[in-house]
């Protein structure tokens, strides 16, 4: 079994601040902790990266590569951010499509965005790629507890 560190998330306040200030230290500190704990790869959960997705993704990739040579998972549905990350990556890259549970309020919208990115990968990368996509109707993690409980109670 290989461990993929899923700690580097744009939803964390310190990571948001690091991006805003272009300060790699909080990102690098977290990555070093993940490496020390035995991570096999680092998942960059950047989300779509707002108004400057290319610069944001390149900042994340460069910051992480300075402290590890582990494989990096690019976890975004933004094709411009994905391409920008691939352009500056020296580490092995794995495209990590987000598969949102359909029961989320915006799950269908997010799932469509992921599938659109997967369809665009050959154009983005300049060569044919094999892909795997999954759509979940289950809820996990943070989300709408009332919907989670309703789904669980109806089984």
Image: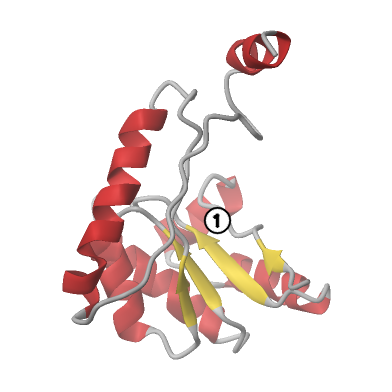
**Residue that lies at the very extreme toward the front in this rendered image:** 155
Closest to the observer, 13 or 40: 40
Q: Residues within 10 Å of mark 1 (few under 14, many from 20)?
A: many
> Residue 141, percent across and down?
66, 35
In this rendering, position of residue 19 left or right of residue 71: left
Instruction: Give the residue furthest to the right.
Output: 37
Q: Estimate the x, y position of residue 87 in percent, counting from the top left.
A: 29, 83
Viewer can see residue 50 = no
The colour scheme is secondary structure
Q: Using the rendered view, name the quadrant where residue 34 is placed.
A: bottom right
The residue that disc 1 covers is 15
Location of residue 24 with respect to 143 vertically, above or below: below
- Residue at horizontal 60%, vertical 60%? 8
Q: Is residue 77 left or right of residue 127?
A: right
Q: Nearer the viewer, residue 24 or 120?
A: 120
Quadrant of res 89: bottom left
Q: Quadrant of the N terminus?
A: bottom right
User: Which of the two residues, 41 or 112, is positioned nearer the viewer here?
Assistant: 112
Pick whichever, 16 or 99, lies toward us.
99
Look at the picture and state if 87 lies above or below 120. Answer: below
Q: Residue 30's x, y, as percent?
A: 68, 67
Judging from the image, what secondary structure is the residue with disc 1 in?
helix
Residue at 45% x, 56% y: name it. Answer: 46
Does residue 2 appear anywhere in the picture?
A: yes
Q: Is residue 75 above or below residue 48?
A: below
Q: Residue at x 30, y 59 (%)?
A: 118
């Amino acid at each position: 079994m290989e461990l993929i560190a899923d700690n580097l998330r744009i939803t964390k306040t310190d990571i948001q601040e690091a991006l805003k200030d272009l300060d790699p230290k909080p990102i690098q500190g977290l990555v070093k902790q993940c490496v020390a704990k035995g991570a096999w790869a680092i998942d960059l959960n950047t989300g779509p990266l707002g108004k400057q997705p290319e610069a944001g993704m390149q900042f994340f990739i460069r910051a992480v590569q300075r402290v590890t040579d582990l494989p990096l998972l690019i976890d975004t549905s933004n094709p411009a951010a994905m391409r920008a990350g691939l352009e500056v990556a020296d580490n092995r890259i794995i495209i990590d499509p987000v598969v949102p549970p359909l029961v989320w309020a915006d799950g269908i919208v997010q799932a469509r965005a992921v599938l659109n990115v997967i369809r665009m990968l050959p154009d983005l990368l300049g060569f044919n790629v094999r892909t795997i996509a999954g759509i979940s109707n289950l809820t996990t993690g943070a989300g709408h507890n009332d919907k989670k409980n309703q789904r669980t109670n109806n089984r």
